Image (spheres, rainbow, N blue to C red):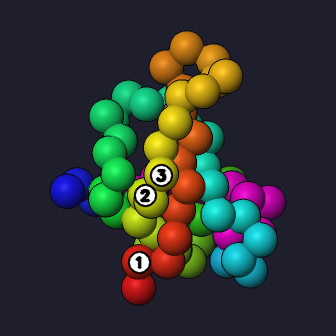
Amino acid sequence: MITHELKILPEYFEPALAGRKNFEIRYNDRNYQIGDTIILREWINGKYTGRELKREIQYLTDYQQKDGYVVMNLFNAE
């Protein structure tokens, strides 16, 4: 299992933090796998805010996505 650190904008970070957004759609340039850990680091104005969320990939699919993109179902890994 691998840990991936990803930038996330505040408008997507807030719903994830509140538990309303439990997925990410990302270009699969990292070979994401079920069981990998995702650290979502809030990014604004070219720098990190210091806020982050730790999630684990529970489900992964490329169904009806643009070439090279995947949808990851994430759950709380803390």
Residue bearing mark 2: 57
Q: Which label is found at residue 77? A: 1
Q: Residues within 10 Å of mark 2 (few under 14, many from 20)?
A: many
- The answer to whether residue 50 is magenta is no
Residue lying at 49% horizontally and 77% vertically, measured from the top left: 76
Marks 2/1: CA distance? 9 Å
* Side of 76 where 42 appears, left or right: right
Q: Which label is found at residue 30? A: none
The residue tagged with tag 3: helix, strand or loop?
A: strand
Q: Earlier in the sequence, mark 1 or mark 3?
A: 3
Is 68 drawn above or below residue 58 in the view shown?
Answer: above
**The one of 26 and 76 positioned closer to us in this rendering:** 76
- Magenta range is 4-16
Residue bearing mark 3: 59
Report the amino acid beneath label 2. Answer: Ile
- The answer to whether residue 9 is magenta is yes
Viewer can see residue 14: no
Report the amino acid beneath label 3. Answer: Tyr
Marks 2/3: CA distance? 6 Å
Residue lying at 41% horizontally and 65% vertically, measured from the top left: 56
Q: Which percent across, then down, holds residue 70?
A: 53, 34
Q: Earlier in the sequence, mark 2 or mark 1?
A: 2
Front of the two marks 1 and 3: 3
* Side of 32 where 74 appears, left or right: right
Tell me whether the residue at label 2 lies in contact with that at label 3, contact meaning CB atoms closer than 8 angstroms. Answer: yes
Q: Which percent across, then down, holds residue 6?
A: 46, 53
